[in-house]
Image (tube, rainbow, N blue to C red):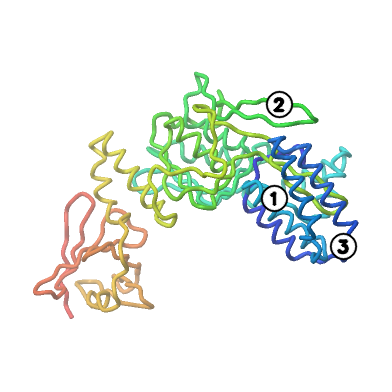
Amino acid sequence: MRKNRSIGTLAATMAWLALVGAAADAPLTTADKRTIVEETGRAIEANYVFPDKAKILAATLRDHLGKGDYDAVTGKAALARELSEDLVAASNDLHFAVGVDPGWVADYQASKDPVRAAAISERERRDEARANFGFDAVQRLDGNVGYVRFSHFADPELAYDTAAAVMRFVEGSDAVIFDLRYNNGGHLEMAQLLASQLFPGDRDQELFDYYYSKDGRRVDRGQWVLPAIPAKRLTGKPVYVLLGSTSFSAAEWFAYTLQKLGRATIVGERSAGGAHPVDRWPIGTDLFVQIPFGQIRDPVDRGDFEGQGVVPDHQVASADALAVAHRLALGELAKADPGKQSDADWFAPILAVRAQPSTTTLKAVTGRYEGRRIDLVDGKLLYTWRERFRLALEPLGGDLFAIEGVQDFRFRMARKNGKVTALERINRDGTTQSYARID
C-alpha cells in the first residue's frame, strides 16, 4: 500500500515475476498492448527517480512495441514478464517489475476508503505476525556472541514488540552478528531502529539521507540514530554483518551504512546492488508496475551501491560467512581482553573449515571404552555411557571431537602405533581424564 512504501525486497519481486509467469488470462489485442505500454510508460515518467532516464525507459518500451517485439505475446502475464525484463535490461535496476495482481489493485483502490484500508492493514499485520515479522533466529553463540537472522525488514509500526524482544536478547552480548545473507530488504525504518542500538543516543548520528517524489514534489528526509530505544545499547561492542548475493535493498543499506561509519565488519559475498526505494502503481484493473521513486545516500560520501552491491571487508563464500565472522568476533574480543583468549582458543576447532572424515576413519574410533562406547550409526558417531545416555560426536579435525550440546569438555582419541588405545576427555579448564579402550 502507498502508506507502506519501502525500498523493496528481491523475494517479493521474484514472487511477483513467478506469479506473472503462472497467471492465466485472456488473449490481448494490439490495442490492449498499446494501452498497457502507454500507461506503464506514463507511470515511469511521472515517478522514476531519474526524470531524464524515465523518458528513455518509456520510449524504450514504446520502441519495442513499435518494432513488433510484443506481437507474439498473447496474455497479460507474458506481456508483464517481457516488460519487466526490458525495464531491468534498459535501467540495470533490479527493482523494476511489472506484474499481474488484481488483488493488489483492488486493495489499492480500497485503501482510499478508511474502513476498507483498516481491514487491509489488519490482514497485513496478521500475515507478518505469522512470519514472526521476518525474525528467523536469535541466539547466543559460543563466547557470548549474539546472533540475529532475519529474512526481511518489517514495518516497525507492526513489528516493534518483536524487534524490541530481539534487541533485549542481544543487549548482554560481548559482540553481535546480524545475518542478512538471505534478507531481501523491506522498511528502512526497521533498519534505523536496529542500527540505533549500535550507537550512543546522546549525540546526533545520521544513518541514511534520501529523497523521493510525492504528489509531484520532491521530499528530502534523513534518518538518524534514535535517542530512545527499547534495549541497552551495544556501543563499542564488535558488530558483524553477513551478506550474500541475494542480500538486497534495505539489507544492503543496513550493511553499507554501518561499514561507511566504521561500525561493523562485513563478511560474505558481494550483495545484489539494489539501492533505491520503490512503490507500486496500478496499470488498468489487474496489473501494476513497481518503480524506484527515490534515492538513498550514505551519511559519509553521499553515495550508494546501486548496480554495484556492497563489497564485504572479508569476502568468503556465503555458506562459510557465519563461521568466519564468529572466529573474527572471538579474536577481536580476545585482543581487547586477553582473559578471553582461552575462549578464542577453545572454540577455534569448532569454527574451523574442515573436511568430513572418511567412513574408514570414523570406524577406527568405534569400540568400547571404560564405562562407555562409541558406535557408527548412519554415518554419525554416537557416544553412549551408562548404557542409557547417548549423544553425537562431531569431528573437529585430527583426533578431536565435540560432543552434541556439551561446551565444557570434548574428546581426543589417544593412539599408539596408529591404533586408538584410549578416549581422552579434555575439560575446558585444561584438566583431563582418560578411558582405556577395552575391546
Front residue of 328/37: it is 37
Say what secondary structure mark 3 lies in.
loop
Which residue bears the numbered disc 3? 28
Which of the two labelled residues, at mark 2 and mark 1, occupies the earlier sequence position?
Answer: 1
Percent from the top left, x then y, of residue 73? Answer: 80, 64
Label 1: which secondary element: helix
**Three-letter amino acid code at the position of disc 3:** Leu
Q: Residue furthest left?
A: 417
Give how far apart the Cα atoms at labels 2 and 3 are.
38 Å
Q: Is residue 148 above or below residue 404?
A: above
The residue tagged 2 is: 219
Most distant residue in the bottom direction? 439
414 and 49: which is toward the camera = 49
The amino acid type, in three-letter code, at marker 1 is: Leu
Residue 151 percent across, percent down from the top left: 57, 50
Q: Earlier in the sequence, mark 2 or mark 3?
A: 3
